[in-house]
Amino acid sequence: MEIFRKFDGLAGDIERAQPQVNLWRKFVYCTSLSGTILGSVDHMKQEDFDKVISPISVAHFSQYKLVDLLLKKLDDVGFQTCFPDELGGSSAQDLLLENKILMGHECSSIQLTDDGILVGASFNNGGRMQERKLHCGLLLGADGARSKVRELAGISMKGERDLQKLVSVHFVSRDLGKYLSSERPGMLFFIFNPDAIGVLVAHDLEHGEFVLQVPFYPPQQMFEDFSAKVCEQIIVKLVGWEPADIQVLDIKQWAMHAEVAEKYVGCDNRVILVGDAAHRFPPAGGFGMNTGVQDAHNLAWKLCLLLNGIADPSIIQTYESERKPVAIFNTELSLENFKAAMSIPATLGLDPTIANSVHRVINSSLGSIIPRNLQKVVLEGLFSIGRTQVSDYILSENNPLGSLRLARLRSILDEGKSLQLQFPAEDLGFRYEKGALVAEDCADTTYQAEKQKHSKRSSGEYIPSAKPFMYLCVSRGRDDFLQGMFSTLDLVSGDKVEFVIIIAPLKESYKLARAMLRITDEFELSAKVCVMWPQGSGGEGVKGSMSELAPWTNYVDVEEIPRASANSWWEMCQNLGH
Ligand SMILES: Cc1cc2nc3c(=O)[nH]c(=O)nc-3n(C[C@H](O)[C@H](O)[C@H](O)COP(=O)(O)OP(=O)(O)OC[C@H]3O[C@@H](n4cnc5c(N)ncnc54)[C@H](O)[C@@H]3O)c2cc1C
């Protein structure tokens, strides 16, 4: 969301369009949407509303709606989407010059040439597949988890594959939305009952829009088995009553992996992977798209420098050296989050690892002996016996086993060991150990130790650090230049490449800032000085910076907003001795 603040107010558009926070702040664990609530966790704290860590809060917004907003923003800056039948006789080169976004085209081939890369984009022309050749300088593979670009570039993935297969059912029901809004609002509903198990994502309760995730086990259970009718029946079993207006919009299958591409950049620096094409995580903790957006943000300024002839092509390699470690870390964290999410069914006697083992045994022992439909009967019979663990009879305070399991579940939820929604320490606390701006020999060797410490599921608070290239803290503007609260990201220009130095209002620091301004002037680069004052340091600041930095005027005075629970930036600077 901080990155989207820079994109012509996109973050504000999302905040206005998303559902009210009270409708999505909770994760609910229940036997059905109208049955017993086994537990629930509220994931918003007062400091999220007070904007202590960041000037903008976490948001809940469907990805397809975000894509619409992004396309609108691109349209505003002169890009237009067009479909194959709208392209007429334009040649490939004309298309590029016209700033068009080609919809309905799939990258299907690549070929390196002396001065670039020839990309084949196939499209359906009235029922006949055709390929358009586009000559490009660079090809960005932002084509998702099953990236064709990655495959064509011969880049392999490393990590754990096929952790689970799921069917994803996008449906609407205003009746269900209305019921949940008034009875038990929440974002994620983990539902366990003897007839069905599933995770329901409530995208928009007001408009009754949902996506249901149901695990399935091929080849005994096939994706094709999940017709709209079957999906509707599963929904009714999970709801506990029959909403009259269920409308299934889309049914998709997907596989969960925990993998990162071996390389982010390939084919002589001509192919660059971004987003899920470069990494695919279990969707536990909301790291997938967020990591992809950060990739794009990291790559954009480097491409800008490269294409404007300011930087050498080697700058593209720093995209990989900066972003890949973050993806590896987030993959491990998402895996741990996934395991934390699975600890709930395991506690209730529905251990998913047992389901996987049963499936494996059936595959290996019955696979070649009995027909597949019989295997399906055996598998579903065993699963159905397994699901009796969450029957009212067993899962009851009157049943010693049930009461023990319910107590364990409550302690997992109370101790914060279940799946969490927010990860400020991990979202903000990463640092590029080596890359575009930190020379390798200056890399902080303590970082590994630090990384281990804050490693996976330590979660919790983000502790600001004064170390170079870390997200710093939230500040308040002190003059007309910046108003209100903002983060260090807000200091950097959104429409040009700009270097920012953050200094304390001290003689030595002003000297350093003047040296930087002289160099950036010499190289005709855009730069800005941010003078960070301690909170409540009075009104002398504006004059102080003015006289110290004259004749330059490209500086801004800001005041730190220290947090009660963490050191202030000033204290950290003093601890570091500068
Ligand atoms: C159930 C679930 C819940 C999730 N929840 C969250 C969450 O809460 N927060 C979060 O941050 N992330 C979440 N994610 C992850 C998130 O959806 C992905 O990380 C994100 O969609 C990746 O974006 P992308 O643009 O890299 O890829 P995609 O969204 O997959 O987009 C790829 C695009 O490339 C196109 N394409 C495919 N092949 C080609 C080709 N050959 N040529 C041209 N174009 C092609 C596709 O049509 C598509 O438009 C979730 C994922 C799942 C499955």
Image: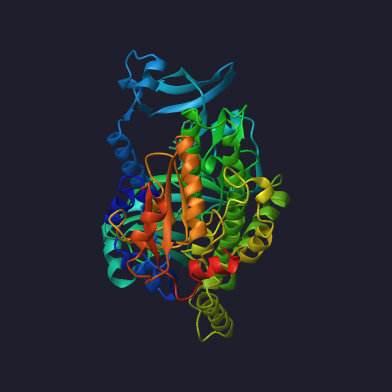
Asked if 347 appears above or below 515 in the picture, the reply is below
* Viewer-proximal residue among 396 and 253: 253
Pinpoint residue 305: horizontal percent, then vertical percent: 48, 34
Asked if 476 appears above or below 230 in the picture, the reply is below
Q: Judge from the rendering whether residue 337 lies leftward or rightward of residue 530; answer left or right.
A: right
Pinpoint residue 526: horizontal percent, then vertical percent: 42, 40
Q: How is the image coloured?
A: rainbow
Pinpoint residue 346: horizontal percent, then vertical percent: 59, 69
Asked if 123 appears above or below 8 in the picture, the reply is above
- Image quadrant for the C terminus? bottom right
Q: Residue at x 59, y 28 (%)?
A: 152
Q: Judge from the rendering whether residue 118 lies leftward or rightward of residue 452; answer left or right.
A: left
Q: Judge from the rendering whether residue 307 lies leftward or rightward of residue 442; answer left or right.
A: left
Q: Residue at x 29, y 51 (%)?
A: 13
* Viewer-proximal residue among 172 and 204: 204
Pinpoint residue 71: horizontal percent, then vertical percent: 33, 38
Question: Residue 18's image quarter?
Answer: bottom left
Q: Residue at x 51, y 78 (%)?
A: 414
* Viewer-proximal residue among 253 and 105: 105
Residue 145 is at least partly visible in this image? no
* Viewer-proximal residue among 245 and 142: 142
